Amino acid sequence: MSDLCARDLRVLWHPCTQMQDHEWLPLVPIARGEGPWLIAESGKRYFDGISSWWVNLFGHANPTISAAVAKQAHTLEHVILAGFTHRPAIELAERLLALVGPPFSRVFYADSGSAAIEVALKMSFHFWRNVGQPGKQRFVVFDGAYHGETLGALSMTQVPLYRETYGALLLDPLVAPSPSGAFGSVDPAASAASLDALRTLLETYAETVAAVVIEPLVQCAAGMRMHDPGFLSRLRSLCDRYSVHLIADEVAVGFGRTGAMFAHQKAGIRPDFLCLGKGLTGGYLPLSCVLTNEHVYAAFYDEYRTLKAFLHSHSFTGNPLACAAALASLDIFATEPVLARNAKLGTAMDKALRELAGHPHVRGIRRMGMIAAFDLVDGKGQPYPWQERRGLRVYQHALTEGALLRPLGNTVYFMPPYVATPDELAWLVSVAARGVEAAT
Ligand SMILES: *Cc1c(COP(=O)(O)O)cnc(C)c1O
C-alpha cells in the first residue's frame, strides 16, 4: 500500500490540494466501494460521509447502475451527438423534462458542472443578442456563490479561496450579498437585505444584465449556507420585473439533496436555465446538462448564416455510458420511496446533531434534506482563522475512526449517500463530535 502511495506521489497532481501536505498527510488508496462504504487497499473501511464530493446518491458499486453501465458498454460506448443521436440521450432528456415539468422543454448536454454553467452563461448572453438586446452581457451572483472552476464558471464563483488568485483572468459580475445569515443559517433578515441590494443593482444595471445566477437553497462550497424557498420566489419575481434570466445551479442540490427532487421546486418557481451535474449519473460518470424552455430555444432557431445557432460542444457531449448510468439512477428514484426514506434519515441526523447543541465550540447547526452542517468556533464564539486549518483536524480524526469527512474551512458537514442507515448517520455525527474535541 505504501508502494501505491509512493507511486502516486511520483506521478499524480491531485485536485484542490497543496501537494506538499502529503509529506505528512497520508493518501488513502481505495480498492473498492460497497454502498456508502469505501474499502481501502489496506482493508480498512471508510464511511463516505460526503458522497465523494457530493456526487454519489445510491452507494458505490450500486448493482442496478453498474449493470446498466456494463450493458451499455457492450452496446454503444460513444457516438458524436451532432448529426447523430442515440436512445439513452433521448430517453434521459424525456425523463428529466418529465421530472421538472413545463415550461422546460429542451436539454443541452455537457460533461461537468462547470461546463453546464459555461453553457448557461453563453446561452443567456447569446439569447439576448439573438433577440436584439446585445447590451445584456453581465451577470449577477451572490456573495459566497460557487459555480465551478473553469474561467467563466470561476468568474461567477465568489469564494475568495478559489477566485482571488485568478482575478485578473475573470469576468466581473455584479455581486449581491449572500441570502443566508451568520454561520450559514436560514435568516429572513439576511435574505431581505440580499433582495434589497439585488433590486438596487437591477434598477441601475438591468439594461446590461443577462442573468442572475444562484445555487438554490444551499450555497454548498461556501460552507453549506442555507436560505429558505421564499427567497427564491421573490428572486424570481425580481428577475421577471427587470427582464433578466434566472440561472439555477442545481449541480450540487439537485436529485433530492434538499428534500425535494429539485431545489427550485420547493419554491414553486421555474428558472430559465437549470444546470444539473454531480448526482445526475448517481455519481458514476461525468455528465451534466442545462434545461431550458421553448422561448429560449426559439431564439436560436434560424438559418445557419444568421449565426444564431448555439455552436458549443464537448467531445463527450451526451455520452451513452453516462446517460445509461443516469437512467438507472432515475429508475431507482422511480421504483423506491427515496425522498420519503431520506426524510427519515434527516430526522436521524437531527437527533444525533442535538447532542452537539450548546457545545462551546459549535455554532450554526443546520440541516436541509440530506445536507447537514455546523461551524467550529473558538472559546469566544468566533470562527478560527482559516490558516489554523481546524477542519483538517476533524478530517484526520474521522479517518482514524473510519469515516470520510472533509470540512470546508471551519464548516463540518455531512452529505451522505442516500443508502446510509439511521444508525450509520448517528455514528457519523458522533465521529464528528469526537473530531471537534480533537480540533479545539
Ligand atoms: C461542484 C459544483 C460545480 C462544478 O461542477 P464540476 O463538475 O466540479 O465542474 C458547479 N456548481 C456547483 C453548485 C457545484 O457544487
Image (spheres, grey):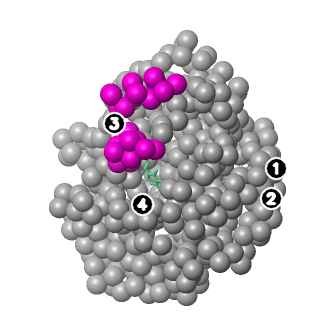
SS for callout 1: helix
Whether label 1 lies within 8 Å of ligand 1 gets the answer no
Q: Residues within 10 Å of mark 3 (few under 14, many from 20)?
A: few
Give the labeled residue for mark 2: 348
Q: Which residues are magenta?
A: 1-25
What type is the residue that disc 4 sits on?
A: Tyr
What type is the residue that disc 1 sits on?
A: Asp
User: Is residue 418 within the magenta segment?
Assistant: no
Q: Residues within 10 Å of mark 2 (few under 14, many from 20)?
A: some
Which quadrant of the structure image shows residue 163? bottom left
Circle 2/circle 1 CB separation < 8 Å: yes
Nearer to us of marks 3 and 2 is 3
SS for callout 3: loop
Dot placed on the residue nearer the N-terminal end, 3 or 4? 3
Report how far apart the C-alphas of labels 3 and 2 lie in the structure. 38 Å
Q: Which mark is residue 13?
A: 3
Dot placed on the residue nearer the N-terminal end, 2 or 1? 2
Residue 77 vertical position relative to residue 81 in the rendered view, above or below: above
Give the labeled residue for mark 4: 146
Dot placed on the residue nearer the N-terminal end, 1 or 3? 3
What type is the residue that disc 2 sits on?
A: Ala
Dot placed on the residue nearer the N-terminal end, 3 or 2? 3
Dot placed on the residue nearer the N-terminal end, 1 or 4? 4
Nearer to us of marks 4 and 2 is 2
User: Is residue 10 within the magenta segment?
Assistant: yes
Circle 1/circle 3 CB separation < 8 Å: no
Give the labeled residue for mark 1: 423
Whether label 4 lies within 8 Å of ligand 1 gets the answer yes
